[in-house]
Amino acid sequence: MTLPAVITDADVTLATDADTLARCIDAFLACAAACTACSSACLAEENVADLRDCIATDDVCAEVCTATARVASRLEKGSWQVLRAQLEACRVACQACAEECRAHSEMHEHCAACATACERAETAARTLLDAIPA
């Protein structure tokens, strides 16, 4: 069973359609994985001291994206206020991580890949924020 099918089968009150929600959740999880991999790759670089902020930002973004995917998976009307706050935190974390990784992207391919994943997750957060009724 696919994630959109599970969401539809759960018969929850959605703030958006199941396919969009599933794509957003996938973007959050992909970002968390990219951030974790980037952090690990940064630790293996010779100039690791120059990458401290990148490592820290990667680690925070990975945690926030994982939590956001979990909260978004419980998308019911009663949780929209919490989801809205979580999505805003995710948007901010992804934006900060993308900016930090872009600063290193010319020297480190893993940072370029991570920045792209962060930008996709930030877009996903904006998509769901726009879909939640006031």
Image (tube, rainbow, N blue to C red):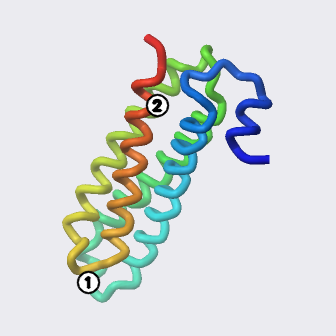
Q: Would residue 100 appear left or right of 74 to someone viewing this image?
A: left
Which residue appears at 19% of the width and 66% of the height? 103
Does 81 sit above or below residue 32? above
Q: Which residue extends farthest top?
A: 134
Secondary structure under the numbered disc 1 in the rendered image: loop
Q: Quadrant of the C terminus?
A: top left
- Secondary structure at badge 2 equals helix
Image location (x, y in percent) of residue 73: 64, 36
Q: Can residue 110 be seen in this view?
A: yes
- The residue located at (35%, 46%) in the rendering is 93
Where does the image place residue 9, in percent across and percent down from the top left?
79, 31
Q: In this view, does 74 lie above or below 44?
A: above
Judged left or right of residue 116, residue 23 is right
Q: As shown in the figure, which amino acid type bears the numbered disc 1?
A: Asn
94 vs 52: above or below: above
Q: Looking at the picture, tell me which residue is in the foreground, 57 or 87.
A: 87
Comparing labels 2 and 1, the label whose residue is closer to the camera: 2
Residue at figure coordinates x 29%, y 78% from the top left: 108
Is residue 67 shown to the viewer in this render?
A: no
Cα distance, mark 2 to mark 1?
38 Å
User: Up-down: is 79 above or below 101?
Assistant: above
Amino acid type of the residue that numbered disc 2 sits on in the rendered structure: Leu
Q: Of marks 2 and 1, which one's residue comes earlier in the chain?
A: 1
How crowded is the residue under tag 1: few (<14 C-alpha within 10 Å), some, or many (20+)?
few
Residue where numbered disc 2 is placed? 128
| Residue at 26 percent of width and 77 percent of height | 49
Q: Where is residue 22 in the image (x, y as percent from the top left)?
A: 60, 41
Residue 47 bears which disc, if any? 1
Assess disc 2: are there few (<14), some (14-19) or many (≥20) residues with their C-alpha within 10 Å of its C-alpha: many
